[in-house]
Image: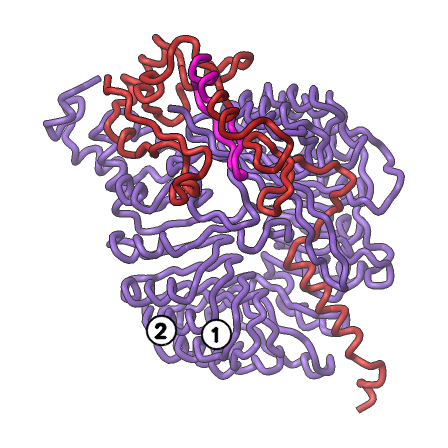
Chain colours: A red, B purple
Amino acid sequence: MSDSPAVEIDFFRLNEEASSKKLSPRRNIQDVISKINPELLKSAFANNGFVANKLSYASHPHLQTLPVYNQECSRVNTAATATPLTIIYNGVVSVFDVSPNQADNIMKLVDAVNPVSKTSGEPVAVKNENNQTPVIAGGISKDLPLSRKKSLKRFLEKRKERKESISPYASLH
Amino acid sequence: MDDRSFNNQRIHGMSDVVFECVLAYIHDSRDRQSISLVCRRLCELEAQTRKHVTIALCYTTTPKQLLRRFPFIESLKLKGKPRAAMYNLIPEDWGGFATPWVEELSKSFSCLKALHFRRMIVKDEDLELLARDRGHVLQVLKLDKCSGFSTDGLLHICSSCRNLKVLFLEESQVIEKDGGWIHELAMNNTQLEALNFYMTDLSQVSFNDLELIAKRCKSLVSVKIGDCEILDLVGFFRAAVSLEEFSGGCFNKQSEEYASLAYPPRLCRLGLNYMSTNEMPIVYPFASRLKKLDLLYALLDTEDHCVLLQRCPNLEVLEARNVIGDRGLEVLARSCKKMKRLRIERGADEQELEDEEGVVSQRGLTAIAQGCLDLEYIAVYVSDITNAALESMGMNLKNLCDFRMVLLDKEEVITDLPLDNGIRSLLSGCNKLRRFALYLRPGGLTDVGLTYIGQHSQNIRWMLLGYLGESDSGLLGFSRGCPSLQKLEVRGCCFSEKALAMAVLQLRSLRYLWVQGYRGSKTGFDLLTMARPFWNIEIIPPRKVNCGDGREMEHPAHILAYYSLAGPRTDFPPSVIPLASITQ
């Protein structure tokens, strides 16, 4: 198993460049996949379970049919007590598997720099005042009228135009 | 695992040559997929002999990944925007850019002869690159419901691709600068078999160029054009001796002038736009030969449809608006026993613009069910429906692979709702169904009915659910079934984020989900229940859309989620936001 790579989490956009990218080094998944024997991984799943799965109440007997995933990367950093930590910042929602200790430290860090408040700077706010990240909540049925196919809409518009432009006396020429 | 396959050129004692020969006969992509999982050598052989690949969503993989897996493909189909884009629901700048693909295809795919982009954004520079680097070998170019390019880009293609057999632009939004591109096509090409710029607004096309193409391209079989006056095409029709399919044109002159028009002898697939009652008789001489008829853009009333369809006993494919009416469908059921595909689209809502008989209901559907037993595809907008009509379809239409029904919202009261039992009968009777769309209204299908859909859809790969079910438990019941469901679209349903996310986890074959209209949670966290590796989740937030005549409409949020080997997108426009899920 490889050593855990160093991870830099830039919450506060101190590094402007990194803020537009993901918060952790991007794994080149496709390179990893192409080196793995599917059969080996399937047996690994069967023996060790799928650690990257963060859910407690859904079971996944069908995971073997998912694309191959490099389990090594996920197991390196997660202790047995890893649970999900969800962070929403600047319109991007990210989920990390961290131990309770790590989560505590992260929270303390946030508190230290930015005391919990209801301003738009708060990292976990979802309802944002700025235009970049509007509310995610979906709409209810009544707001959704039947929409028409583009091609037909265009035809019906053209037909209306034709009707309005053709005068009833054209045939008398 | 047989490790000998690594070094030797033999698999289980048989040489590669044997497998190469066998593989040449295997075309179905699912079969090839199974073969490629047997062992590494077969995976390599299969990859080397794969001729065509369809990538259902361009963001699920990258050009480099495609190159590594299938370097010798001759034909590629790529799809971009969600299907809802055809209904004006997706922001124009959503994505689906052809550029990165064209760059790699031009550089590295030496065998590529056929390219099909569907609902993608293609630029003139892309077409120029394609023409320059692949012009000498390109035989098929389909820009299907694409946008972002102009006739300048087409000019490059038509000048350089002298071996082009198929040029398809149907429903693309092309910026028209001039008609030079078709002139180039006429001057340079003798191989053309199919030309299609149907439902584009390209109007500066000279009929002289069309006539020249017909004269020079002896194999010209299919031509679908924009609005060109039919009388100007006399020369074209005379020259196009091999023509079997024609659509487009329009009728602007006096009806009598059209009477003497002669059509090519093999013409059997026809779509005449703006054809009205008076011009209809021009079709009579060869109506009995017709296999396909497109009346979507014709100006006929219900009676016209009845009169015309009676003369078409060999009809296999019909597209019409619901002005055809129940009466028209009854005539169809009596006269056209070979029908395979039937599409009835929604006409104008205003009563004055369409025939008052122009409604389709259980009466027409029952007639079709009993009369057109070979039907494989039906898509219909109905104003009324009953369970019995659906049961009749389930009992009789054993070859049905594709069923799509939308219940229009004009009528307040529907004869027979909910449709639970009818839908169950339909699904259990039509066991070859692969695609299924049902769009009703609140009360149209209960949670029990939605669960029935899950239980009786063994082979269905694509589904659209519109206003179905009553609560989350309906969705969860549904998602316990549908073993083959790969692509799911949900609109106007009352499901919560959490239920949607849980359903996604239960649908074992699901690789693509689109939702518009759902009960959002305050935080948006509930969606994360479905977060997992390789699963991209994107949101198109609610937005105000200009729908013409100064009105603005509020479009609710969309969720788009799909498996991808390429990681999250890197080209989001402002109108789309990702829910990135990362594990370390």
Query: Is the residue A52 above or below the residue B201 in the image?
Result: above
Residue beneath disc 2:
B190
Residue at image coords 43%, 63%: B123
B442 is within the stretch colored magenta: no
Residue at image coords 41%, 39%: A14
Kindly tell me whether residue B421 is visible in this rendering.
no
Q: Nearer the viewer, mark 2 or mark 1?
A: 2
> Quick one: SS at disc 1?
loop
CA–CA distance between discs 2 and 1? 13 Å
* Magenta residue span: A86-106
Which amino acid type is marked by label 1?
A: Ala
Direction right: furthest residue? B413
Residue at image coords 66%, 35%: A137
Question: Front-most of A110 and B123?
Answer: A110
| First of labels 2, 1 by sequence position | 2
Query: Is the residue A61 above or below the residue B86 in the image?
Result: above
